[in-house]
Image: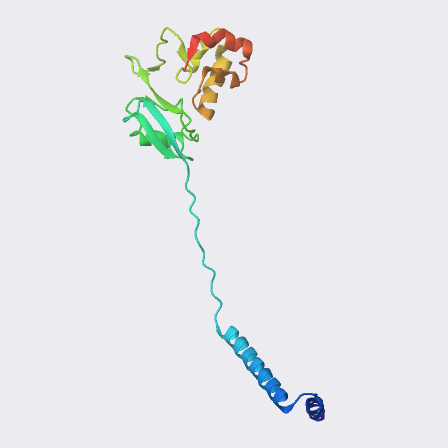
Amino acid sequence: MEQLRDAFESLRNWWFDLHYSQRQKRALLIIGSLILVLSVFIVARGNSQPDEAMEVIPITITEPEIFVDVTGAVNKPGVYTLTGKSRVIDAIKAAGDSAPGADLSTINLARVLNDGEQIYVDSTVVNRNGVRVSKAVRSGPININRATARQLDALDGVGPVIAQRIVDYRKINGSFLTIDDLQKVSGIGAAKFAQIKAKVRI
């Protein structure tokens, strides 16, 4: 209490010792009072207003579209538009699903599709005894996107091991876009490719 009284006395002495006129002191007192009231008002208002929640704007990411040609033993062959992460099974379903007698064993149904590729669904060939057999090999260049391992094995210098590698490459990476892509298969170098390139086609 004594300290408060001393502080008030010091403030009073400071006020009377100011070298201002009565009018200036009065103006100074009014301005100080206004600043004090305004400060209290701003602090009180800031504490009473709730914090505004930040507006969350959802971001929509659109997947790119790809075009895929589905042909062979499907109900509705044609070119279909699919999303970028679609798989081979999605393309076949878009084409009305596989037709009766389709052979899906040579296709990797879980592979992710690439834009512009062709999905060919082969047909199963059954002989008179109901036994599944390979299709007869046609004369002329072999279609490397449709040929079986046995048909590819018939090419000079290929053999069963490389023929199976070609089929496996197709299952994993999709159809060959050019015959030059055969050189991406392990075991087919420039010399072997030069030997067989005239006997294959897309």
Q: Is residue 167 above or below residue 6?
A: above
Q: Position of residue 91 (x, y in %)?
A: 35, 30
Side (left or right) of 34 relative to 172: right
Q: Is residue 11 left or right of residue 153?
A: right
* Placement of 54 over or under 128, stated as above or below: below
- Out of 52 and 143, give the one closest to the viewer: 52
**Can you give x and y, in whole percent of width and height, for residue 145 in the image?**
41, 18
Q: How does the figure colour the protein chain or chains?
A: rainbow
Q: In which quadrant of the rendered view does residue 104 lie?
A: top left
Q: Is residue 142 rendered to the left or right of residue 186? A: left
Q: Nearer the viewer, residue 48 or 70?
A: 48
Quarter of the image with the N terminus in it: bottom right
Query: Can you tell which quarter of the image residue 24 is in?
Result: bottom right
* Residue 26 percent coordinates (x, y): 60, 89
User: In this rendering, does residue 157 appear at all?
Assistant: no
Quarter of the view holding residue 126: top left
Query: Which residue is drawn at the image coordinates 52% and 73% (left, top)?
Result: 46
Most foreground residue, 90 or 27: 27
Camera-side residue of 148 and 81:
81
Residue 190 screen position, x and y as percent: 55, 11
Residue at position x 33%, y 30% from top? 80
Q: In this figure, what is the number of numbered marks?
A: 0
Q: Quadrant of the C terminus?
A: top left
At x 35%, y 25%, the residue is 69
Q: Is residue 43 visible?
A: yes
